[in-house]
Amino acid sequence: MYGEKRLKWSVAMRSKQTILVVEDDRQLRKALTTKLDQIGYKVVSAPDGEAGLKLALDKQPDLLILDMLMPKLNGNDMLKMLRKDRRGKHIPVVVLTNDASPKSAQAAIKRGAPAYFSKASISLAEVVEVVRYHLGD
Amino acid sequence: MKLPEKMTDKVPIVHKKQVEQAQAKEEALINSLSDGIIVRDQKYKITKINLALTEMLGYTEKELIGKRTRDVIKIKNLSGTTPSEDELTTRPSQETGRPVSGTFSWSTKEGGKIIVDVVTSPYRIDGKLAGTVTVARDVSEQAAIDRAKTEFVSLAAHQLRTPLSSINWYLEMLSDDAAGKLSTNQKDYLQEVMFANQRMVALVNDLLNVSHIDLGTFAIKPVPTDIEQVIKNVVAELNNQIAQKSLHITTAFSGQVDNFLIDPQLAHIVFQNLIGNAVKYTPEGGSIDIYAILDNERLLISIDDTGYGIPKSEQDKVFHKLFRADNVVKRDTEGTGLGLYLVKAIVEKAGGTIGFVSRVNRGSTFTVEFPSTGMKKQSGSQVLAAHRKHQPQGV
């Protein structure tokens, strides 16, 4: 417990990096934001692509964790619009989805998403590893 | 068959009548069949069809005789792609001298589509190859029912993934003491729940994979791949179980296996299942030998274990869905029974073959073979899922 508190403090003091989680499933969104908050990141979240796009452009987070299959605006379309805006061009994106379509993966990677994972097959600890890798922690 | 005109004067009338009767009988027989018949010559041109075929497709005899089938009928694979000549049945049947079967979508004259199961066989006259005969059965109704069932399974499995992901992550946080310190017993029980959840995730992935295979929607993307590395990665994933059972694993590779045209994700699934089964069904202290040999003609992969084996009475069901042999179900209740069905479907769709030999309490040897040209490419809208997370691009 002490070890984790110390780690949380050191991460927060070192970076105060912001992560935006865009995920329509309430439980998954809560699990991701809780875990990343515990590790010491500042976390904001959105339940659909429309709200996610607005938040991404306003807050310009250090990392975006993005679901693909969402109501109002799906992940691929949100990413497309994000990249068209100079404020969203360079935000690193990690895609977390259960959509197994290679077209979807290719489209996301083409738009600069450096990583694409299946939610059903990745643990929270592995998500944290990926986040740390892309934030340079 | 008509007698040449110049013969009609010389052939006695009684023989002429017999020939005409035989021809009429042949016509009646061929037209009484409910399946469509296409007879072709060696240049693949249609020489004869039956009534059922004209009714199936809406074309008249005149519109088909003398033409090649695909000059008239638009033929597609079930996935919607256009099959090459080698993927159809006529050329392979003529070249191999054996019956070749397949299932395709044919367009009718009116622009509709039917699903047909075809079997094409070569035929000989006086020992010489004269052409081929195709029997075509309209299975559109059954195909529609099967498709609806498969789509339902696919949808249900897909919907299940989200709550399963949720259960996984909350269990993980609980067991990390994120909601307060747990006792050893509580952690043990949580561990059992997590294992059960992982089994459900594996089952859902397998069901989704099976539905993609049955619908023909999965992609095969061969790229130059190091087979040795793929196999070693799979063995590394199984290290814990291998160590726990003190199994001896040997691998041997021959030929340029580091640069073989194969879909790495599908290869991973194939080896994960075959090597995983060998590890699961080999008792403590046993051994598993894995060989991959590439020569000018083929890649041969062999997985040979000293495990429980498969009873002879059940060997014909090994590649069936949800099959698990009685002698292993009693020992181990895990396993979905879908792995070998998946493996066979992947291997065969990719142009390979799979076989095995097995003896109870002596072990099994599974062999997979691909032509030296590698896996056959197939376009598709879905990727099959292995039992691990995807590897990130660039990481």
Image (cartoon, coloured by chain):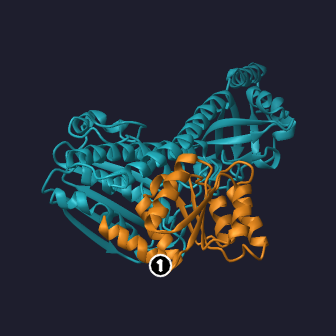
Chain colours: A orange, B cyan
Please report, as a chain letter, where disc 1 is located: A
Residue B260 seen by the camera: no
Residue B30 seen by the camera: yes
Amino acid under disc 1: Met
Please name the residue shown 15% across and 60% down the image: B246
Position in image of residue B150 (x %, y %): 58, 36
Residue B268: which quarter of the image?
Answer: bottom left
Whether B102 is drawn above or below B391: the answer is above
Which of B287 and B94 lies nearest the eye of the viewer?
B287
Please name the residue shown 43% across and 37% down the image: B321
Whether B359 is drawn above or below B351: the answer is above
Q: Quadrant of the N terminus of chain A?
A: bottom left
Whether B88 is drawn above or below A5: the answer is above
Which of B32 and A90 lies nearest the eye of the viewer?
A90
Dot 1 crowding, Cα within 10 Å, few <14, some 14–19, many 20+: few
Position in image of residue B44 (x %, y %): 71, 49
Name the residue at the left extreme: B285
Residue B78: which quarter of the image?
Answer: top right
Q: Secondary structure at mark 1?
A: helix
Residue B229: which quarter of the image?
Answer: bottom left
Where does label 1 land, which residue? A13
Q: Is residue B70 left or right of residue B153?
A: right
Q: Is residue A29 left or right of residue B27?
A: left
Which of B212 and B391 lies nearest the eye of the viewer?
B391
Position in image of residue B215 (x %, y %): 60, 43
Which of B334 and A119 lies nearest the eye of the viewer?
A119
Position in image of residue B22 (x %, y %): 70, 23
What number of labels is visible? 1
Q: Is residue A39 left or right of residue B49?
A: left
